[in-house]
Image (cartoon, grey):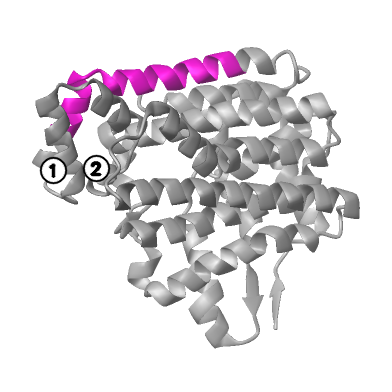
Amino acid sequence: MSDQNKPNDKDIKSAVDSLFDCNKMQSEDFSTYLSSVAKTIGDLVNTYIPHSTTPDINAYLYDPLLAYSRNGGKRHRPLICLLACAAVGGDPRRALSAAAAIENFHTAALIHDDIADEAELRRGKPCLHLTQGIGLAVNDGDLGLTLVNGTVMHDPDLDNDTKVRVVTELIDMTQRTIEGQALDIGWARDGRYDITPDDYLMMAKLKTAHYSGAVPLAIGAIIGGGSNDEIEGLRKYGLDTGLAFQIQDDLLNLVGSEESTKKDFRSDITEGKRTLMVVHCLQHADEDKRKRLIEILSNKEHDQKVLAEAVDIMQETGSIEYARTYAENLTSVAKGRLVNIVPDSPARKLLIGMADWFVNRLK
C-alpha cells in the first residue's frame, strides 16, 4: 500500500500565499522571483510523490524518485501553471495537482532521456541509472509518468469536467513529447544530416515547447476558469517561448559557462544532436567545414578540444548567432501578443518576464 503525503489545507494555503505575495510579485523580475519560490514549489510538488508502508518499496522506488526530484531543477513549469491560473482570475491552489503532474512528467522524461543518451550527469550529480542501475531507473521514470494523470484524477478539489479537460491536455502533451523524442533520437541513430531548420523547429516544439510552456499555461488557465481566448492565447505564448527555451538550452550546452557545467558540457555534440545551430551550420558551411562537423558529430567525441572545434565551426558560420536571434525574436513577438489577451496583473507581469528569462540565461 502507498499513500501521498499531501500537506493539510492550512499548510497549502500558507505556502501558496507565500508564492503569491503581491509585493514580491510586483517588485521582482521573473528570475529573482523563481529563485525565491523554487524551494517552496519543489516541496509542494514532492508531496505528490507516494510513500509506502513497505520499506523495500521505498528503498527501490519512491525514495530514489523523491531524492532525484529534490535535487532541484528550475521549477518553472509548475510555477507558470500556477501563474496562468492566477492571471485569468482563478485560485492557484486549485492548480497545484496539475502543476505537480507536469513536474513529475518532466522528471520522468529526464530519467528516460539520460538513459537513452547514455548521459553521466544531471544537475551536477550522477544520473539515476548510474546510481540505481538501468532497471530501477526505468521503473522510476515509469512511476513519474503514472503520477501525471493519477495526481490530477485523485484531486478532490477539481470537478470531473475539469479533470477530464486537464487529463486530456496531459495525454496529448505526453504523446507530442514522445514524438519529438523519437525524431531527436532517430535522426542521430540513422546518421541523418539532411535535417533542415524547419525540421528542427518541428521536433523541438514537440519534444519541449508543449510541456515546458504551452500546456502548463493552458492547463493553469483552464483550471482558473479562463475564456477560450485566454486559454489559447496563453497556449500560443507558451509554445513560442517554450521553443525559445529549448533553443537557449541547446545554446547553453555549447557556449554556456557555470550553468552548463552542471550538465555534461557540450554533450549535445558527443550525442550527435541535430540542434538548430548544427542544422543551420550544415546548410551554410563550406564543404570542408561541413565534412569536419559531420565527422565530429558521428564519432561520439569526448575530447574537449575537438568539441570546441565543432563550436568554432558553428560560430564561424554564424549559426550560434542565428539561433540566439531566432529565440529572441520569438519571445519579443510573443510578449507583444500576450498583453492584448490577458488582463494586466502581477501574474501577467511575471509571465512576460518569463520570456526574457528563457532567452537571457547566457547574458
List the residue tagged with mark 1. 304
Residue 296 on the magenta span:
no
Left/right placement of residue 101 relative to residue 249 reads: right
The residue carrying mark 2 is 269
- Residues shaded magenta: 309-334
Q: Percent position (x, y) of residue 347?
A: 70, 27
Q: Quadrant of the C terminus?
A: top left
Q: Main secondary structure of the magenta part?
A: helix
Q: Is residue 323 highlighted in magenta? A: yes
Quarter-of-image position of residue 354? top right
Tell which circle, 1 or 2, labels the residue nearer the N-terminal end. 2
Which image quadrant for residue 290? top left
* Badge 2 element: helix
Q: Position of residue 124 (x, y in %)?
A: 33, 53
Q: Residue at x 67, y 48 (%)?
A: 172
Alpha carbon distance from label 1 to label 2: 10 Å
